[in-house]
Every structure is written in structure tokens, then in C-alpha cells.
Image (cartoon, rainbow, N blue to C red):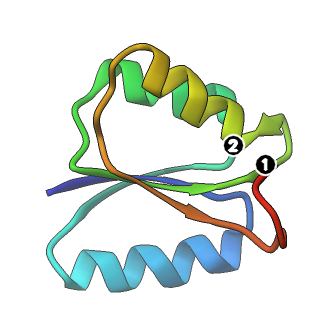
Amino acid sequence: MRLLLLEDNRRLVELLRSSLDRAGFMVDAFGGISEGAAALERAAYSVVVLDLGLPDGDGMELLRRARARDKSTPILVISVRDALN
């Protein structure tokens, strides 16, 4: 299974990638919305793990754009926010 990880915290990316690799996932990790959006258009992913607070934009906007394009890929949102707005 191929997973797209969008997270800007390098330590968290390392920990998640290591665990997901051991679980059998192929992980493509990016630290920004623009890179993640491009990857989502180029490749088919089984799941996306999406941080909402990325340095170049709001993860919710990427989620909205993906859904507007009929992308039905499951998206797991991770955030330190206390509301999704």
C-alpha cells in the first residue's frame, strides 16, 4: 500500500515513516501543501495522512480540493488544533 504523508515536523515524519515502513507501507512524505497536492495528482495513494498546519497553507484546503476533484482517497487528519473550522 502506498501512503502520502503531509507533515512538516521532521522528527514526527521520521517516526511515522519508520513505523509505517515496518507495517508494509510505501511512504511518500512531503512538508508542504504544494508538494502534497502535486503528489496526489501524480500518484494513486491508498491513504493520505494530512497535518492541517503546514507552512505553505492550510491542510483543510488541500482536503477540500481533493474532494472537489472527486478524489475518494481516505484522508486521516492529524492536528494540534482544537477545532476543524
Question: Looking at the picture, which amino acid does disc 2 mark?
Answer: Gly
How far across and down, in percent of the image, does residue 73 sit? 29, 40
Q: Are dots 2 and 1 in contact, CB under 8 Å? A: yes
User: Residue 40: x and y, percent?
Assistant: 40, 29
Q: Nearer the viewer, residue 62 or 84?
A: 84
The part of the image, by quadrant, that contains residue 67 is: top left
Tag 1 secondary structure: strand
Residue 38 seen from this side: no
Query: Based on the displayed image, in which of its 4 quarters is residue 23 positioned?
Result: bottom left
> Is residue 77 among what the camera can see?
yes
Label of residue 21 in the image: none
Query: In the rendered image, which residue does mark 1 sit on?
Result: 54
Residue 65 higher or lower than 20, as above or below? above
- Quadrant into which the N terminus falls: bottom left
Among the two numbered marks 2 and 1 on one chain, the one whose residue lies closer to the N terminus: 1
Question: What residue is disc 2 on?
Answer: 59
Identify the element where label 2 is drawn. Answer: helix
Q: In this view, does 20 lie above or below 41?
A: below
Residue 64: image quadrant is top right
For the point 72% across and 68% down, the residue is 79
Type of amino acid under label 1: Leu
Q: Which residue is drawn at 48% across and 16% down?
A: 68
Estimate the x, y position of residue 43 in percent, counting from the top left: 27, 28
Quote the CA–CA distance across marks 2 and 1. Answer: 7 Å
